[in-house]
Amino acid sequence: MMNIPFSPPDIGEEEINEVVDTLKSGWITTGPKTKRFENQLTAYCMSDRTVCTDSCTSALEMTLRLLGIRKGDEVIVPAYTYTATASAVCHVGATPVMIDCAPHTIQIDYERLPYLINSRTKAVIPVDVGGVPCDYDKIYDAVMSRKNVFIPFGPLQEIFGRAVIIADAAHSLGAKRNLKKTGVLADFTAFSFHAVKNLTTGEGGAVTWIKHPDIDSDELYRQFMLLTLHGQTKDALSKVQLGSWEYDIAGPFYKCNMTDIMASIGIAQLRRFPAMLRRRRKLIEYYNRELSDQSVSVLQHYGDTFTSSGHLYLVKLMWQEEDYRNEIIRRLAENGVAANVHYKPLPMMTAYKRMGYDIQDFPNAYDMYKNEISLPLYSKMTDDEAQYVMETFKQVLED
């Protein structure tokens, strides 16, 4: 029997060497490698600027704070996502307004979206679940159709003049829609580099944004730096320059910066990233062939207008319920195959039930969840391991 983990990190000698180089340099906190990683991410995404943080959650929260989103405001988020999407909204005191999936899909109901946008709506945070980018054209159409009800607070909101679109692209670095990469599909885009993500820095995240003719991008970057490092007007690297010790505190802000140790892993990962994405695609295409005659439905990762990052392999066990799905996961585990569920909808979680959310108001999200199972998928998975996963899964389904 093989033991197949769900999603181990793909770390090799390049990452180890890059970290050793950082440790030997004497500079391990935010410094030259973090800045280099930011610049490389900007070039990769073809965006305007990038700020690295300690998590995707921080990237989302700092973006909301930068935009002046606060108590009394509303931010639309999917019901079908991980808590980080909504908790970032809660952190700034705003109210997450949940939107259901469209029928038979994990993506939000684009037709329903305009009806949720009102004068309190300051942002929409779509989520690229599994690595498949949302249809951002439809999201832009929705927010533009309700531009007339938008009431701005502060200069940035006045410049946008509509609800701001912030992509939760925790899963989708490297994905494309209409030949454009994630990072330039929304106004702002937040990435995750957690250990299970396609590109990892152990923990970590980033926010990148597209150029706006009326926004000074250098000033935007400076504001992000203040927010992520206590409001300190100089980072540690600047302070070590001769005679440059003195700094000011612009505000009692937050501490969520990336370190050079983390960034060094990301630099090495980004060099290998195209090959890692190709490997994921090969595995997904193999899984798809193997399951083509089974009573399952799989997430479509590749189409005429989009290319996924291949982050998760989501399978729906057609016409089944929660108990059956949970039994399949248990039996896979008995045979050495780790599986997961993405996601238990937020209205089913205690924290959000206490806020008044009820899963009965989100029937499509529940329908997606009740028989979904995520199978192991990672870039260093061997052909033999992939074959074992498929053989085991099909055997468990047949028994």
Image (cartoon, rainbow, N blue to C red):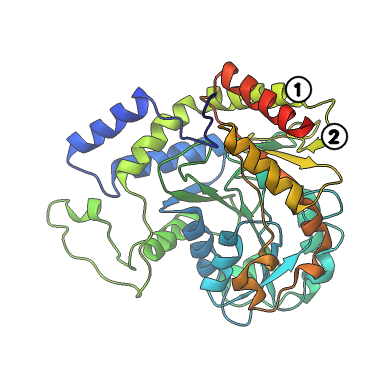
Rendered image: mark on residue 290? 1
In the picture, measured across the screen, residue 11 lies left or right of residue 318, that is left
In the picture, measured across the screen, residue 333 lies left or right of residue 399, that is left
Residue 136 appears at what percent x and percent y?
A: 74, 50
Q: Name the residue type under label 1.
A: Glu
- Which residue lies under the disc numbered 2? 295
The image shows residue 293, relative to residue 299, as above or below, that is above
Name, please, the residue furthest toward the bottom: 72
Residue 44 appears at what percent x and percent y?
A: 53, 35
| Nearer-N-terminus badge (2/1) | 1
> Can the viewer see residue 375 in this picture?
no
The image shows residue 148, relative to residue 312, as above or below, that is below
The one of 192 and 69 positioned closer to us in this rendering: 192
Q: Secondary structure at mark 2?
A: loop
Q: Quadrant of residue 243?
A: bottom left
Residue at figure coordinates x 54%, y 60% from the top left: 60
Q: Are marks 2 and 1 in contact (CB under 8 Å)?
A: no
Q: Secondary structure at mark 1?
A: helix
Q: Name the residue type under label 2.
A: Ser
